[in-house]
Image (spheres, grey):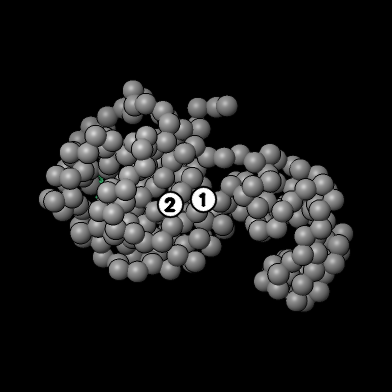
Amino acid sequence: MSDAKIRLYLEHPLGPGQSVPLTADQAHYLFGVMRLAVGAGVLVFNGRDGEWLASVTAASKRGGALTCERQTRPLRMPPDLWLMFAPIKKARTDFIVEKAAELGAARILPVQTAFTNSERIRQDRLQAHAVEAAEQCGGTYVPEVADLQSLDGLLAHWPEGRCLLWADESRVGAAQALAGLPGGPWAILIGPEGGFSEAERTRLAALPFVTPVSLGPRILRADTAAVAALTLWQAALGDWQGD
Ligand code: SAH
């Protein structure tokens, strides 16, 4: 059973000997798609209790149960980093959410800016992408995807003590090192395809918690910019520096 490969996110509490009922969707995936039978091992996590090796103790088409055997990884929280981005086309927005979960963002916040192309998002779909990314990358934590909110509103109620790294396309040029920046809670802000409006720029530039940065000498698409900014931040201030 130690060769269990499937990783499944579920909501139920996990602990020694804990029995976990399966939903119809989970049963369909494990028994219909992956063809597991009673006795098979599965790795499960719920974002709170770490990762557990569990064995299938009941299996049917519409349900089933797992029993937790032992913890295989403790809960590992990502650094307190938010990714704020203006939603773009569907596939690229999905990509941003998936990469943010893989790269270790703690929260993902779609924001409506002056030039945001999309008025609505499917929060449940985006959340499901974050879950899938955590399942495949070995994460024990799933970042929350927030509902779409306005950048103005978010800035007006900005949490005390959180710094904001603003990917500012007008600074296109040599990327500056982030190494000197303070630790603690941060957020990254990536604009839409149309960039930021003059009013947004003026506002962001005047806010004391904002640090504008360049992401190098080329203008990146928003999805690339999100990956680049998360990478720079993680390497300089995040959990890529070892425990
Ligand atoms: N249409 C804009 C570019 C928008 S790119 C223009 O031509 O100026 C989308 C977002 O990615 C930007 O709002 C910014 O947040 C980020 N971005 C892209 N390239 C960047 C760079 N070289 N430096 C900093 N931010 C960048």
The C terminus is located in which quarter? top right
Q: Mark 2 highlights which residue?
A: 108
The residue depicted at 68 percent of the width and 46 percent of the height is 49
Q: Which residue is mark 1?
A: 143
Instruction: Report the amino acid beneath label 2.
Output: Ile
Question: Could you tell me residue 234's position as x and y percent?
Answer: 44, 35
- Residue 201 drawn at (x, y percent): 17, 46
Q: Residue at x 85, y 51 (%)?
A: 17
Crowding around mark 2 (Cα neighbors within 10 Å: few <14, some 14 to 19, many 20+) is many
Name the side, left or right, on which 41 lies relative to 148. Answer: right
Res. 101 visible in picture? yes
Q: Residue sitting at 80 percent across and 69 percent down?
A: 64
Residue beneath the point at 17% across and 38% down: 206
> Residue 149: where, in percent of width, then height?
34, 59
Q: Position of residue 147 (x, y in %)?
A: 41, 61
Q: Earlier in the sequence, mark 1 or mark 2?
A: 2
CB at disc 1 and ligand 1 closer than 8 Å: no
